Image (cartoon, helix red, strand yellow):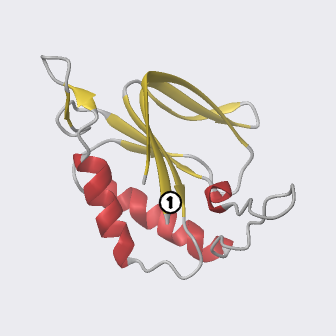
Amino acid sequence: MKAVIQRVKKTSLHVDGELISEINFGLAVYFCVEKDDEESLLDHYKYKILNMRIFEDENGKMNKSVLDVNGEILLISQFTLCADCSHGHRPSFFGAEKPDRANEMYLKFADMLRSENIVVKTGVFGADMKITQENDGPVTIIL
């Protein structure tokens, strides 16, 4: 399992020219399920993402979580995070989980995040998504 977490001021996601999801402040989370990932990892990722102190407090220190600042999350499925670039020039995606199981875990993860009273919006699994975002900082964390 991998996640790229970006602090954003605004992010929108379109599929076929149609606006699917948009957040105004919070986190864009690019999320990948790899082969043989256990569902128990979802709890760990939920805890880390929701409690990661990457928002500034009143003193300008990164000391607040997305929960503390009432931010939102745009959760974006992205199997390309599992790319193996160690050989040749074409990445291998052999490590990606099969689409059915990956989508099931992606949707479950979105629901787990929502269970903590935070607005979570999603993309469309497997779609050609066009994402526009205004990064804040920028702050990018790889989990």
Left or right side of 67 for 84:
right
Q: Quadrant of residue 25?
A: top left
Where the C terminus falls, by quadrant? bottom left
Identify whether 95 is placed above or below 91.
Answer: below
Q: Across the whole image, how many numbered discs are drawn on residues?
A: 1
Which amino acid does the dot numbered 1 rest on? Lys
Q: Residue 59 occupies which quadrant of the picture? A: top left
Q: At 39% from the left edge and 41% from the top edge, which residue is drawn? A: 73
- Looking at the image, which is closer to me, 59 or 51? 59
Q: Tag 1: Cα neighbours inside 10 Å, few (<14), some, or many (≥20)?
A: some
Instruction: Give the residue at x 41% y 57%.
Output: 110
Please indicate whether residue 109 sits to the left or right of residue 101 in the image: left
> Could you tell whether 15 is left or right of 21 in the image?
right
From the viewer's perspective, is 110 left or right of 97? left
Give the secondary structure at mark 1. Answer: strand
Residue 40 position (above or below residue 19) = below
Q: Position of residue 29 (x, y in %)?
A: 46, 45
Q: Is residue 114 visible?
A: no
The percent coordinates of residue 77 (x first, y second) are: 58, 54
- Residue furthest to the left in view is 58
Residue at point 36%, 60% (across, down): 111
Question: Residue 32, how many percent across, how many down?
Answer: 56, 60
Q: Nearer the viewer, residue 81 or 105?
A: 81
Q: Residue furthest right?
A: 89
Q: Is residue 68 above or below residue 137?
A: below
Residue bearing the label numbered 1: 2
Q: Nearer the viewer, residue 15 or 140?
A: 140
